[in-house]
Each structure stands twice: as C-alpha cells, then as structure tokens.
Amino acid sequence: MTSWIKKIAGLRWLRWLLGIAVALAGVIIMAFVYIVESSKALQPPEEVTDKTVYLKQHWDSTARDTYYYTPQGTSVPQGANLGALRYSWFVNLEMPLSTERFAAPGNMRRFKFLVDPAPSTANPDHLPVGFTKHFNTDLGEDVLDITCAACHTGELHYKKGDVNYAVRVDGGQAMHAFTDLNRGTFGPTLITALLETWANPVKFDRFADKVLADGGDRGALKTQLGHSLKAFLGIKQNNPLKHLYPTREGYGRTDALGRIANTLFGDHLIESNMQVGNAPVSYPYLWNIWKFNWVQYNGSVSQPLARNIGEALGVGAVIPLMNPEGGPLPAHARFRSSVRIPDIERIEHTLQTLQEPEWPAEIFGEPDAALAAQGKALFENHCVECHGPHRATAARMRAEAPLKTTTEDQWLIEVIDLDHIGTDPNAARGFLDKTYDLTPAGIDRATIKAVLTPLFDKQLARDVLARLEALAEADEQAGIVDSPFAQLAANYPDPDQLALNDFHDAPFEAIRSALQASNYLPSKKVNANYQPYRQLGCSTQCQVNALWWDIDYGRAAVAKKLDALDPKALTEGVGLNVVGLLIKARYYEDNQLSHEQIQCLEGFGTLDLPQQIAGYKPRPLAGVWATPPFLHNGSVPNIYQMLTPPEERDKRFFVGRRDYDPVHLGYVTSPASGRETDGMWFDTSITGNHNTGHGFSASKQQWAAYKADYKANPLPKGVIGPVLSHEQRMALIEYLKVHRDNPEGYQFVPGNTCLASYR
C-alpha cells in the first residue's frame, strides 16, 4: 500500500514538474514572439528608390567593386575565430518568426545598408556594400567579412519629377546603425535570428538543407551555431548591464576609437580595461585622405597602413593576445592578426584614385554662378586659413612622406585645440585621458622602447634634414652663394637608412658649426621645453630655432618621452599605436619583406607615430556638401546651420532619413508622416552630442578688434568668425557646391603594388 502511494505521489510530482516546464516553455515562447513582433514594429520600412546614380568621382565599376567587396580580414562577431559567422550561414539565414531571407536586399535596406541595384561577379549573393567573405583557414570555410566600404559609402535620396533618385557617394558617410543595440536594429535582430534557428527544429532543418546542400553533419552545424551565439553574447563591451555606451550612437555614427580600444584591450585582453564610450562620431568621408599628413577627427594618425589596420581591428579582425590560461602568448606567436594586408593595400590604392564628387546639377539643379563667386570671396576670407588645403613645401614633404613626388600630394592638416574650436570635447579628450594596461599581452617597457625608439630617431633625423633644406632655400632666395646648409643637406645621412648606416652625432656637430658661422643663433625661448613648430608655414628664425632644439634637445626629449610611458597605463593613442606597430612588425618578419617594400606598403614612407592634441582637425572641404550631418559628432544637420551662431542651431532634430535638402545642404530633419521608426531624434543636450563651437557669432566690434590685433583681442571660445547674413550664408553654400581642392584636370595614378614581388 505504501509503495502505491509513493508511486502515485511521484507521478503527481512528475506531472506537476512537467506542467511547470510546459507553462514555462509557453511563457518563453510568448515572450520571444512578443519581443520579435514588437521589434519588427520598430524597424524602418525599406528604402525604395527608382534610379541609382553614381556621382562623377573618377571611378568605374571595376574600382567600385574593388573598394566595395575586397575583404580585409574581419569577422562577425567582432574578433571571433571559431565562433565566426560563416558566409553561407549569413546568406541563408531567415528573419525571426519568418521564412524571409535575412540578407535579402529589401531587408538589408530596412537596416539602412546600401545595396546595389543588381548582383555582380564581385557580389553574386547581392549583399550590401561592404559585405563580402574571406577564407578562414582554422575553420576551413568562408566567413562573413565587413569592409571599410560598409561605413564609408553614402547615398542621398532626392525626388525630381516622378523619379526618386538614389545618389551614390563613394567614400561618403554611411547611414546604418551597425553598432546600435536598440531593439529592431541590425545586431539584435541578427542574434535573434541565429537563436531561433538554433532552437527551432523546423527552422534549423530549412537552414541545414541550404547550408549543407551536399550533405553534412547536422549535429556539428548546430554545435557551430551555438559557438557563434556564445561569441555574440560574450562580447563584454555590449553587455547592457555595463552601460559602456550611454550616449546612443544611432544612425550614421559609432564611437570609433573607443570601440577599437574596448575591442582590443577589453574583449581581447582584460575586462578591467573596458572604458565608457560617450564620444560617437560620424563616419568621415575618404576622398583625398591619403594626402593628409594627419587623419582621424583628432588628427592623431599619420600613416595610411596604421589607419587601415586600426579600422580593421575595430570592425572585427582577429588578434589573439593571450593564451587560454589567461597569460601572454609565447614571444614567437604574438601579434599575428587576421588583417589581410595585401588586400588592404589594394583598397588603399583604389581610394587614392577617388576624387571629390561633382555636384549633380541635372538632379539638384544648377548652382548660381554669380552667388558662388561671392561665396568664393567669403570662403577665402573666412575658411581657407583653417581648411586649406595647405600644400607642403618640398622639404616638409620629404620629412613626412619621402616617397611622394610632388607637394600637390602632401597636405598639411592643423589640429585646432578645444579652447579655440569649442566643439564637443569627448572624442578628443578620450584619446588622451583613457588609459589601458597592456602588460597581460606581454608588453613591457622594453617592448615599447624597441618599437618606438627607431621611429622617433628617424623622425628627428628627417626633421633636421627638412630644416637644413629650408635654410638652404632661404639662403638661395637671399642671394647667398654656396650655402653651407645646402652642402650639409646634400651630405646628410639618409634618415630612412638609420639602422643600416649607424647614424652618429657627427652630422649634428657639423650643423652646429654651420649655424654659428652663419650667425643663425636661437632666440632666448629655445630651451628643453620649447616645442618646434611643425605645422603650417614657418619663418627662417622659426626654422633656426627648431634646428637648434633638434640638435641640442631632440634626443633627450625622445628618451624622456619613452621613459614616461607606463605599459600598465598607456593612453588610448599610444596603446593603439604600440599594438599596431607590433602587428606590422610580425607581418613583415613572417613574410620577409624588404625595407623598400615596407616603406612603400606603409604609405609613401610615412612614419607611424601618434599625435596627441586635445582638438580637432579642419579638413579640406571639396565635396563636403555630400556628407551631412556635420561636426565630428554629426550634431549639426546642414551646412546652413554650420554658418550660424551655435545658439541658433537645432537643439533636437531627426536623423535616419536620406532625403536630401539641396538648398541648405543636409538631410531632411523631420520624420515622414507617421514614420518615426525611420530613424531617431538627435538630442544635442546629451554629452557627446553637443553642437557648440565653430561659431560665426562674433559681433562687428569683436571682429574688428580681432582683425586689428588678434593676440591682444582673441575671440571667445568656440567663435571663429563674424555673424554672417542670410545672403552671405547662401553665397557660401553656392560656392561649396562647386569648390574643388584638387586643380582642374588632376588625376593621381598609384604605382605598382608594394607586395608584387612576394604575392
């Protein structure tokens, strides 16, 4: 009797537990359905246009395909290897609670990605611009690869008559919300689709039928899907409980340097390195950037290859920094990354042929020539001083990019400090204020000195040679025959062969003697704390002062700077610089590249040393009309408002629509009727979103006093010019439609690939 009672009681408990399990499963399913359906309601409708027009930028379809679909070695999720999303999975994955293909062109357009009108040989699966594949040798399969084109290609929509045009801007600014984790955006929807495919047997079978068309191990496929899901959910910086990105990035923006650093030093190294990212920036446009001596919004990077490796690491290149036990990898195994440097070189060479876009008068209307002429005078009076472009002297070009052959191809970019420009400080300050511990990767003081000392020495030697050439030119202009500086420059050891020529102090002593003999003496301000001026034009005395500082204090300053670097607390700039240098050094060693190949590959012999200034660069403005919104953080919707006092700018505006306003040069800033899911409201009161600074707001009295004596009467913080009338603003707008930075007929033809001999 007792045993029967126990059996009945046990069955009751079993039924009770089973009932709870069924109810719980039902709740989970209903919650999943609710989340999916409510998320769908938050997604924008598909962007539909009638005709895609490519602006005149000196590219044909071959160049465009090379830029759009050449892989760079990235993976999704960021930095995943065994958990990487296979290419075949992505093209066959279904949307959550749907049989619709996730990667279908219409669906990708809903996420604001650009999709070409038709598939091509380079893109047979008709994926968005910048979505491609590369073969992962560890997996033995192709994985999804996201390239720079995904974020640096733009489009303007404009309806003229009955035709809704999509005006493609190659090298322009993307509109997607790739790093946004709000419901309904790309990332959360992709993870949800993977999760349902893994958990739903019916959906998994459909998926497996397509992915394993020739037969295969379905159990292994499900396990691999689980690894990928685990990799997605294991990205520490995306943990919503950590609130690492309190300022929503949203459409057309990402906290670029912050995410690169968090990926590299946090996700790939130690969690304690994670930093709050509250400095989202717009994706910058790319034409002519290979000419700049400094790139990034804060003017922090000089070398093209360093810029591109950093971008690939941010998008998701794999770089193991620690062993499975949490210690440093063996020295011989460190800093091998998945970055495909030969392919990055192909992309870079292609971008060197990209020119600023021409205003499409047949779509947006003819510019007003008379008004543009007035605008040109205003531009030269108020804009050129900062925006240039400022061509380098021959000596300066040889010091910074010795493999360039003409000063037309080396533009000097000055960084304007925050106290002057007055724009939102977060992006600039973060580069200097955030610090990271790199010692878990085996990086110590000796490592840092080993990679940086040769570059600092080489830069010092290059600077000295540039000063000598400048003084020789000054002597020639003054009618001095047989300038000693010309002879010294001619006999100066090649700075780029320092390691081979065993550079000694003898040249410095000869320079000192020549300076004294020519009575070229330093001013009293030249001491150990003097900062040689390396930006725009510099007088003879300025060059003399800098040369004296170089030979008297240069090497001691390098040693002092290196001694101050603590591998447990490196700034964002130095930390990214050191890791990038180590990645390159490993690649060069593994592939036995020659000195000449390395010089070419790095970009015209440009050195990879960071610049750390709390400020932002004013870049040349050809084609700027095609790149809204404006300022580094996208906080000003159109160029008209860029020309107004900051207090008159919109404090809140809508972003996400591509509909173009050719009058004010920006996107339409209000949602279409009943369609707020098209984008989001941009609030300029939030940290990282401020629209202050770059103000044409000086009174007539302030401006007159400033022009009379700018040192005695500086403008207030964030004020750069006088209040402009509506007519003046419109004149500047008309001129910017036709402004060119390159001379008429200019065309750059890149040389042969740097890696031809070993590829």
Image: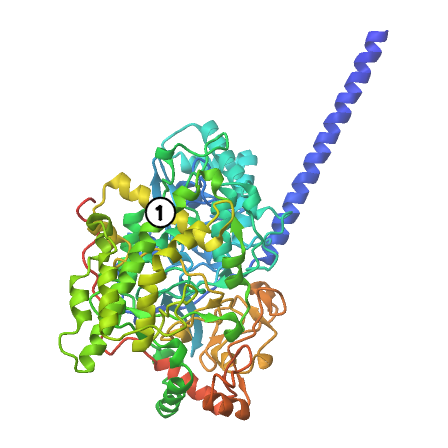
The spot of residue 104 in percent (x, y) is 44, 52
Up/down of 108 relative to 544, above or below? above
Q: Based on the displayed image, in which of its 4 quarters is residue 477 positioned? A: bottom left
Instruction: Describe residue 444's horizontal placement relative to residue 540 as left or right.
Output: right
Query: Label 1's element?
Result: helix
Location of the C terminus by quadrant is top left
Q: Is residue 489 visible?
A: yes
Up/down of 358 relative to 45, above or below? below
Quickly name the residue at label 1. Answer: 451
In the image, what residue occupies the spot 57% across and 59% down?
278
Which of these two is toward me, 391 or 364? 391
Location of the N terminus by quadrant is top right
In the image, what residue occupies the spot 23% across and 78% down?
474
Up/down of 316 relative to 551, above or below? above
Which of these two is toward me, 518 or 74? 518
Which amino acid type corresponds to the residue marked 1 in the rendered image?
Val
